[in-house]
Amino acid sequence: MTLATATPSEEARDKAGASRSGSRRSGPDTAFHFLVAASALLVLVVLGGLVVLMGVGGSQAFRTFGLGFAVHDVWNPVADLYGAWAPLFGTIVSTLIGVAIALPLAFGTAFWLTAMAPPRIAAIVGTAVQLLAAVPSIIFGMWGFFTIVPFMARTVQPFLTHHFKHVPGIKFIIHGAPFGTGLMTAGLVLAVMIAPFMTAVMRDVFAAMPNMLRESAYGLGATRWDVMWKVVVPWSRSGMIGAIVLGMGRALGETMAVTFVIGNVTDVGWSLFAPRSTVASLIALQFPESPAGSLRLSALLALGFILMLLSFASLALARMLRGNTK
Amino acid sequence: MSDTVVSISGWKPNPRAARRRSADHVATAFGMVMAGILVLVLASILWTLLSRGLAGLSAAAIMKPMGPPGSSSGLANAIVGSLIQTFLALLLATPLGLGCGIYLSEYGTDTNKFASCVRFVSDVLMSVPSILVGLFVYQVMVAPFGHFSALAGSVALAILAVPIIVRTTEDMLRLVPTAMREAGAALGATRWRVTLSLCLRSAKTGVLTGILLALARVSGETAPLLFTSLGNQNWSFSLTRPMASLPVTIYQYAGASYEDWVQLAWAGALLVTMGVLAINIAVRVSARRA
């Protein structure tokens, strides 16, 4: 509303400014315009530089290994052979596990907060969840390292191995020594990390729906779940998708929460309980050991470039879906 | 068609209503269980943090600098290093973010291609994995000079802070009514006067909130500091040398096998979390009062 009314007059102001440009007052005005435009340009340059430097730095790896770099599953610093598939696989699978666990948590909590909880409790829990979305990721990493990893190693993995060792299909997924680290642990920690954020966004989206719609549905005899599933969810679909994709984007590039619990072995396999690595954790751990100008450094930068593309793609996807449904 | 109408309007309890009711019960239970799990897990994180962090927190932990394991060392230089780098980052990011936000809201009309491009890029920057920002600054400010520096760490943090400040500044300036701008212009004020003395002034609280949120965001960041300011075991106030920071110290100490280092890591984690939460709560309280 304010935007729509502001735009024409802003354009008018632009024209007025242009016609006045010869007058005495234009000096400081031009300087101010130049200054703020320059800072806008600088922001553009920073992202451009980020993409270009990552691409240029990784070009040596791309040249050496060709397009196979993305699908080659060997990461061997001793033989100087590098392929991106192992860390990419770890990143994608741990992110998917994280989102798959966080989504029901966030949706259920947002449902409870907007439809069931007493207003006072909803306000307290809602604020607490919003605050927790701001907790630094390294805290989640530490918690995972000291709580989840021992829990997985001592309780979950022995239990699963004991009961499902001989079940075809499942035995490949739970295969591995009980280290406690791995894709499943990383996915769990990521889920706990992104769930508050997703809950906060979903709650805002649900609460933004006009109450009239909700009341009309209840008036027609709909149950709480009918209202949720047939009125609220369709109405706020684009916002929900935005929340999911943003959470996914966070999980994709997360470094500290994952590095503690992933186990850091560059390997590919079916097991969700064996140590793996992700793009971000591999960069964090191997970058300090990579001498400048080496093929390894270039391979790491190439990985960074691919991660950049992934996060870029997830943002573009979020925007596209939001645009389509509007 | 007529069949369903008859069955709905009938007074007898019909299977469809029963199904809807049971679906509602299941969904209600699902929502409660999920909310319960989330709240419990998050409470357990806070509880772990508090109990283990308070155990490690002492006067010595705050007053003494870092040292070898078993030497009753502390976190003083890391705390001071974090403060220096974070505030330097804000010092760099605030003018840039304000400038860019002002440009987008005051000059970036819908027809301005450059502005919409900058707006998109700023959004992309907001979701760029922070470790990539660290890699970028490493290549620009560490590799050419041959050594790590606190300044590089601050620049990396500033890059993360700028898009947050840009977004809130633009949003807040857009909320300023056009009539205010027109009134200023009618009084003969130049455009920069109108922007700075009227618009920015009336949007002050919101803009300040954005800066505080950016501060909260970057003060817990670890990944971008790993390759830029690196960390330092000793006191250092030189911006051109490696400098310790709380998050990097937590990262180094938490993975160590010395009991006293792990305890210090928890104390540091508690300090960082409390700082971040305090800023967020302050923002909330001031927003409610405004």
Image: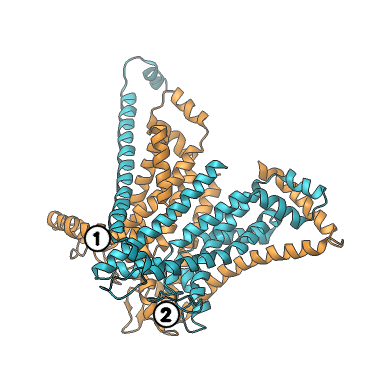
Report the disc number at residue A149.
1
Q: Considering the image in quadrants, where does the N terminus of chain B appear?
A: top left
Q: Considering the image in quadrants, where does the C terminus of chain B appear?
A: top right
Give the chain ID for the cyan colour.
B
Specify whether B132 is left or right of B263.
right
Callout 2: few (<14), some (14-19), or many (20+) C-alpha neighbours within 10 Å? many
Question: Could you say whether the residue bearing mark 2 is in a helix, strand or loop?
Answer: helix
The reply to whether dot 2 and dot 1 touch (C-beta < 8 Å) is no
Mark 2 lies on residue: A297
Q: Quadrant of residue A281?
A: bottom left
Please indicate, yes or no, whether residue B168 appears anywhere in the rendered image.
Answer: yes
The chain letter under disc 1 is A
Disc 2 versus disc 1: distance between alpha carbons? 30 Å
Give the chain ID for the orange colour.
A
Question: Could you say whether the residue bearing mark 1 is in a helix, strand or loop?
Answer: helix
Q: Nearer the viewer, mark 2 or mark 1?
A: 1
- Which amino acid type is marked by label 1? Val
Please indicate, yes or no, whether residue A93 appears anywhere in the rendered image.
Answer: no
